Image (cartoon, coloured by chain):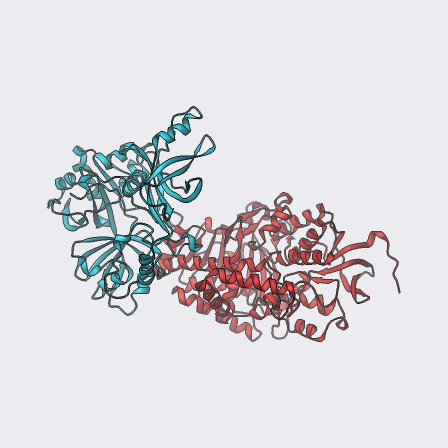
Amino acid sequence: MTGLYELKRTPFHERTAALCLPQNWRRWAGHIAVGSYDLGLEREYWAIRNGAALIDVSPLMKYLIEGPDAARLLDKVTPRNIARLAIGQVYYTGWCDDEGKLLDDGTVTRLGETSFRLTSAEPSLRWLHMNAVGMDVTITERTDQMAALSLQGPKSRAVLNRCCDTTVDGIKFFRMAPNVLAGRTVTISRTGYTGDLGYEIWMDAADALPVWDALMAAGGDYGIAACGILAMDMARVEAGLFMLDVDYTSATHAWIPGQKSSPYEMGLGWTIALDKPGYFVGRRALEREAREGSAWKMVGLEVDWEGLERLYAAVGLPPQIPAMAVRGSLPVRHDGRQVGYASTSTWSPVLKKYIALVHLQRPYYEPGTRVSLEITVEHHRRHAPGTVVALPFYEPEWKRK
Amino acid sequence: METQVTGASRYDAIVIGAGHNGLIAGAYLARAGRKVVVLERRDVVGGAAVTEEIFPGYRFTEFSYVVSLLRPEIIRDLELPRHGLKILPLPSTVTPMDNGDYLAAWDDHDLTRRELYRHSPRDAEAADEYSRVMARAAKAIKPVIGLVPPDPSSLSWRDLRGLLKLGAYGASLGESEIYRIAKLVTQSSADLLDEWFEFDALKGTKSASGIIGTFLGPRSPGTAYVLLHHYMGEIDGAFRAWGFAKNGTGGVSAAIASSARALGVEIRTGAAVEKVVVRGGRAAGVALANGDELHAKVVMSAADPKRSFLQFVDAQHFPDEFTQAIRDFRVRGSSGKVNIALSELPQFTCLPGEGPLHRGAISISPSIDYIERAYDEAKYGQLSRRPYIDMIIPSMIDRDMAPPGHHVMSCFVQYAPYDIEGGWDDAKRDAFGETVIDTIERYAPNIRRAIVGKQVITPKDIERIAGITGGNIFHGELLLHQLFFLRPAPQWADFRTPLPGYYFGASGAHPGGGVMGAAGKLAATEILRDWR
């Protein structure tokens, strides 16, 4: 009976619950996930940008795809050229319906010649099965059996080297390697959702607690902090990374066509391998869009600090900044006319700027375009001036090094 | 012979029947300044939306029992919340299974997915997409419900404009949506569900909404549409929400009646209409069973089509084809109700104790086969030995329904054929009640011991008490050939009838039943349009 009326707990719950003193829990893919371990987000945020942050990302959907046709299946459902994906390499990708509209996004890891791991935000079993008709492939969901931790921040490599049997120095950006941590077999990929140096550690759910404990112990000297998803939310905006159901709507969930987005519109043009041979889902529509250009594009917006100050000064206040990323749609205007909207906006502590992921109509998405973001100043609608910039907002040199 | 008419009994409009549609029509007419009387044969208003205290202290929502389809514009226009309408949440459905397990579904996406995943991971994912697709289709069809059906054979300006509007709307939906809808209106619910799911209890439970109020089984074509009809429910703008009205559906009727009275409607109970008075080729009033005659400029019937056109009005006033179409209109009752007063909560073996699931629906629908088999028996005039039952425990949702510590349970049961072999009698009614209790007892063994009293309602009783010919809960089945511009008869789906001054606005009219109120409102709108 227990669990019948509750959301799921992750394999790290025993540890995370003990640390989550403010009881700030959020929902994530049917699980409860820690929003923050402190009442404020600063310590966790700065662990991502200045130390090492340990984030429980177990709610990610995980699928094991195996068999002679495993590569063929992934080549069909994603726009990336899976033939080029080397063993031990990770691709980030979105995937589309046949109209070239995004369904979800995640990573594909080649574990072996005929074996892959796919992560996604939403359940994808049905979609994979539908596309696997006639293929010699088995698809196994591993969401509950596999725990995952994200260790992010400039000190993450040092922390791992201290507690792993093999050094992680050799793992290049978006590569993966097996390792042993606290005596447990894990795989470590150099991936993350923060745009910083970072790794994700994949393990059997049964090994979750010893791995967590070893990482926390090893990270003590490096300022490791357990970090909730709210601080990560700020970091991912700085990194220009979008989120399903916040920055775009899955084509299967959209009520009206206008709610759907294409990968080109979301800035994923670089993932679409139109040069790969044969059909893949959405190919014709994506080819058309590549030819004709996109009506919309997601880009960055940096709000002018002086402009913001002026708006608040007019009512006798200093600028009021939300303490966490705002997941609400805000109109974006150009010359007094609405040309798009912001889907997530946040204060960036590392950049000292107010930034937003914005979706703008052609031609306003060109970097350098002057636009304004609607903000509410003392219950009145105001428009804060700003500039369109290319994403990401923040990319430290050590991210890929 | 001219009857002397006094000012007091002279009305602008007479509405026959104080069910929710009659009351709604009356209220809208009064709101437009007309002098209206609504006549009710029984001494309670509500028709098939009544709550009655059959056993002292235990209040039964006697026939209809949940609300969802009631049109939001009616709630606003008639200010029903101010007149006491409260729709309480009905947040879950649980299906006990024969192996002692159960399947639960909540209004929470994550909980439902988690629960379904236990039974079938693939169904858990499909369920998500399925409900989106159905809700989108329902959303696409919904505007049509609020429309007076244009006649496709007519060349009148209004019908053409209506058809154009409909065409333009259809075009706006996009190809895939149109194909989806075309499939939905022709498929059987079993075929539809087989395309999506593999788990029996899930398919059984979902298929049940496709047969409610029809004399069809889940494998009969057309039932997918009925299933969709039930997806159109909306509460406070949230699609697919079902609720329980405080005080049962009688609470809905009471709110509408209160609003109607406040608008100046006179409601007369104990006033059975015998005939519609026709003078100079127009409906001019009604003659009551007690000999009284009331006169009005227009008469609207909110009774079922058979009574409205074959009983209240002599056939000589109608063209033969119209009369024939009404005679052919299928009103086969297929369901009954068993309302039970309980001294304790039924204890379901699969979910012991008292839990949140007692506040939702409990569905005896272990598989499509189970329901189809139940239909097989009914098809040949027999009771279903193991019927589909949709139960709610109103006292768990609204504590005012039963004395403290005690409960009432509402059991909708299908199939119970109106045309049972040898006809209905007391023995058969008892047997029907026993079958239902037996079936429940398989899943909740304490039920028999808990019974304080029970009311068994056969389709014949629905006809006798609520006055619905054939005892069909929708005043006529929601069959494809009985919908939209064919409801209740070709050419007469616009709430007018071949007899000038006589209008028709009830479940048997477009867009059909389900405590929706749309027919009553649309009929009143058409009456007012003709007034000018």
**Any part of residue B402 in sight:** no
* Location of residue B319 in the rendering, given as x and y in whole percent from the top left corner: 72, 73
Vertical position of residue A2 compared to residue A39: above or below = below
Q: Is residue B211 above or below residue B108?
A: below
Q: Is residue B37 above or below residue A198?
A: below
Image height of A250 relative to B328, above or below? above
How far across and down, in percent of the image, does residue B405 sit?
54, 46
Given residues B511 and B280, the one toward you in this image is B280
Residue B217 appears anywhere in the view: yes
Residue A230 coordinates in the image, percent (x, y): 32, 39
Q: Residue at x 35, y 56 (%)?
A: A101
Tell me the residue at 52%/71% (across/down). Answer: B375
Q: Is residue B28 left or right of residue B408?
A: right
Chain B shown in which color? Answer: red
Residue A193, quarter of picture: top left
For image coordinates 64% across by 68% down, the residue present is B155
Q: Nearer the viewer, residue B324 or B190?
A: B324
User: What is the display colour for chain A?
Assistant: cyan
